[in-house]
Image: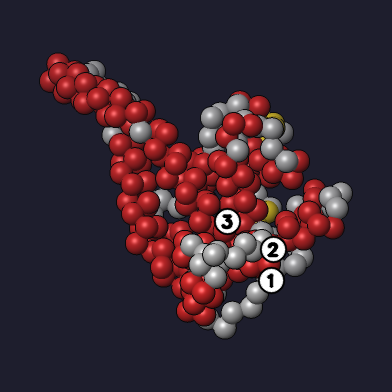
């Protein structure tokens, strides 16, 4: 006869090893799949990245493919003091057809690209959630988050890791990008601190003029911003992503 146990009880039980967990669940006639849920296979940050490296490198291979398609989808611009000859016009016509074809393929892969980038952000965000020990916000624009309660500040502090860009650590940019990707049904209606992060990315000044970057403007109600976030972080290749993660976690 199976023993009924609450998940609260299961979380409170201490096991010396994953093997002990499995023996416990067998003895109680509980599903092994539930036992696996309570097993902590990823016990170190090194293991977390090593175990996922195959999947991560595959995601970045897909991202590089989409980026190559995008580059092939850009029309060339003729800049010259000399008139365009007929042979050049003929070549441009052939190239235009190829560019149009590549553009169609690229556009058909947009959702896939968002999914790939969102998955990368999800992985990076979870790594910070699991392994970051940062407890303070010491960066240029930390004052923008000073009005939040202590619990929220502690959450934001955990993500205040990595190199800074536009006055904030990339950990917060990862966090905001992951949040928008996981809640695409809400559009730009994110939590206030995520809105602040997107606003920082969106607004910039050139001379005496202020501009808004449409790639991060939540009022544009883009379906998904994950690929824009990954592009902003400069993660064109797995090696660049890995360097940022190595710098954050010292691995």
- Residue 222 left/right relative to 103: right
- Residue 203 left/right relative to 17: right
Q: Earlier in the sequence, mark 2 or mark 3?
A: 2
Asked if the residue under mark 2 is in contact with the one under mark 1, i.e. CB atoms within 8 Å, the reply is yes
Up/down of 191 relative to 98, above or below: below
Q: Nearer the viewer, residue 84 or 23?
A: 23
Q: Residues within 10 Å of mark 1 (few under 14, many from 20)?
A: few
Please tell me which residue is depicted at 57% across the width and 47% down the height of the picture.
178
- Screen quadrant of the N terminus: bottom right
**How many labels sit on residues?**
3
* Residue 121 position within the rendered picture, expressed as x and y whole percent measured from the top left: 52, 51
Please tell me which residue is depicted at 55% across the width and 64% down the height of the picture.
2
Instruction: Spot the residue most to the bottom.
Output: 16
Up/down of 59 relative to 127, above or below: above
Up/down of 172 relative to 208, above or below: below
Asked if the residue under mark 3 is in contact with the one under mark 2, i.e. CB atoms within 8 Å, the reply is no
- Which disc, if any, is residue 190? none
Query: Judging from the image, what secondary structure is the residue with disc 2 in?
Result: helix
Q: Nearer the viewer, residue 161 or 21?
A: 21
Q: Which residue is mark 2?
A: 8
Instruction: Spot the residue most to the front.
Output: 1
**Nearer mark to the viewer, of 1 and 3:** 1
Q: Residues within 10 Å of mark 3 (few under 14, many from 20)?
A: many
- Which disc, if any, is residue 12? 1
Asked if the residue under mark 3 is in contact with the one under mark 1, i.e. CB atoms within 8 Å, the reply is no
- Which disc, if any, is residue 125? 3
Residue 38 occupies which quadrant of the picture?
Answer: bottom right
* Residue 6 position within the rendered picture, expressed as x and y whole percent measured from the top left: 66, 61
* Residue 160 position within the rendered picture, expressed as x and y whole percent measured from the top left: 68, 60
């Amino acid at each position: 006869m199976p023993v009924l146990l609450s998940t609260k009880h299961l979380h409170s039980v201490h096991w010396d090893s994953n093997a002990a967990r499995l023996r416990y669940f067998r003895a109680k006639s509980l599903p092994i799949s539930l036992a696996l849920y309570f097993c902590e296979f990823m016990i170190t940050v090194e293991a977390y990245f090593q175990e996922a490296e195959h999947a991560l490198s595959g995601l970045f291979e897909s991202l590089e493919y989409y980026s190559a398609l995008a580059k092939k989808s850009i029309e060339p611009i003729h800049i010259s003091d000399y008139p365009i000859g007929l042979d050049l016009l003929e070549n441009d016509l052939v190239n235009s057809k190829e560019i149009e074809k590549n553009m169609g393929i690229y556009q058909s892969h947009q959702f896939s690209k968002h999914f790939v980038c969102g998955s990368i952000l999800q992985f990076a965000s979870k790594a910070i959630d699991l392994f970051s020990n940062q407890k303070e916000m010491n960066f240029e624009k930390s004052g923008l988050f000073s009005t939040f309660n202590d619990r929220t500040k502690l959450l934001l502090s955990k993500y205040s890791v990595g190199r800074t860009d536009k006055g904030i650590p990339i950990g917060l940019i990862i966090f905001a990008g992951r949040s928008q990707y996981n809640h695409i049904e809400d559009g730009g209606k994110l939590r206030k601190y995520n809105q602040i992060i997107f606003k920082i990315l969106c607004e910039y000044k050139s001379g005496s003029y202020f501009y808004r970057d449409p790639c991060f403007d939540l009022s544009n109600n883009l379906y998904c911003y994950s690929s824009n976030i990954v592009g902003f972080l400069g993660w064109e290749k797995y090696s660049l992503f890995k360097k940022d993660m190595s710098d954050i976690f010292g691995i």
